[in-house]
Image (cartoon, rainbow, N blue to C red):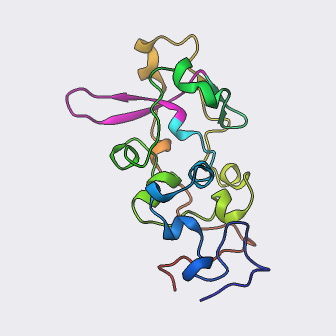
Amino acid sequence: MTISDKDAAPGAAATETGADAPFWRVKGLGELSTREWESLCDGCGRCCLNKLEDWDTGEIVWTSLACTLFDGESCRCRDYPNRFATVPDCLPLTPETVPGLTWLPPTCGYRLVAEGRDLYWWHPLVSGDPDTVHQAGISVRGRCLSEDGVELEEYEHFLVDWPGENPMEEKPPVGFISFPRKDDA
């Protein structure tokens, strides 16, 4: 199945095969340019939430506490270029690390591409709009607090399940123009 160039969202393919296919459908994480890599981030902010790990079981649980550098309105890092110097436990996402990071949310573009899956309808690369991640209820906007002033011992009082969920699956809102996925053809 094909869609016309006129109907395609920015970053969407005019056809499902060949050179016109979007980069995330034809390239592995290690093949992406810096620009392509950075654009895989949907701006949800879920990865910037603090997580706790059970030392005995390895189970990861999320909190509603965000990194000190996280801007809860824009859902972006306030000092992205210097984040590793400012926050020593900030983990870099790389083609090598992504497959092993079990705490990446199931909606994460990096995780989806690493698993050979397609991006969801609300991802800015598909929708052409950076606000659809917020409109779809995927982002942490309005759902988190800063870690500033909260003692580590208190983190257990901020446990949440929703960062590990995919509330919308792939159901676009009424009136949203969806584009076929490679496995739907």
Q: Of all residues shown, which one is farthest toward the right?
A: 6
> Residue placed at 65% from the left, 65% from the top?
126
Regarding residue 166, the answer to whether it shows in the image is no
Q: Position of residue 104 (x, y in %)?
A: 44, 44
Left-right relation of 130 to 119: right
Q: Is residue 82 above or below residue 185?
A: above
**Relative depth, front residue between 16 and 73:** 16
> Residue placed at 47% from the left, 10% from the top?
151
* Count of marks placed on residues: 0
> Residue placed at 47% from the left, 50% from the top?
165
**Relative depth, front residue between 104 and 158:** 104
Determine if the magenta segment contains residue 164. Answer: no
Q: Position of residue 40 (x, y in %)?
A: 58, 53
Q: Is residue 88 above or below residue 163?
A: above
**Relative depth, front residue between 160 and 52:** 52
Q: Of all residues shown, which one is farthest toward the left?
A: 56
For the record, the magenta segment spans: 48-68
The quadrant in which the N terminus is found is bottom right
Determine if the magenta segment contains residue 67. Answer: yes
Regarding residue 127, the answer to whether it shows in the image is yes
Q: Position of residue 176 (x, y in %)?
A: 72, 70
Q: Position of residue 173 (x, y in %)?
A: 69, 66
Q: Quadrant of residue 178?
A: bottom right
> Residue placed at 68% from the left, 84% from the top?
3
Left-right relation of 140 to 49: right
Q: Is residue 77 above or below residue 88?
A: below
Q: Is residue 150 above or below residue 176?
A: above
**Relative depth, front residue between 129 and 157:** 129
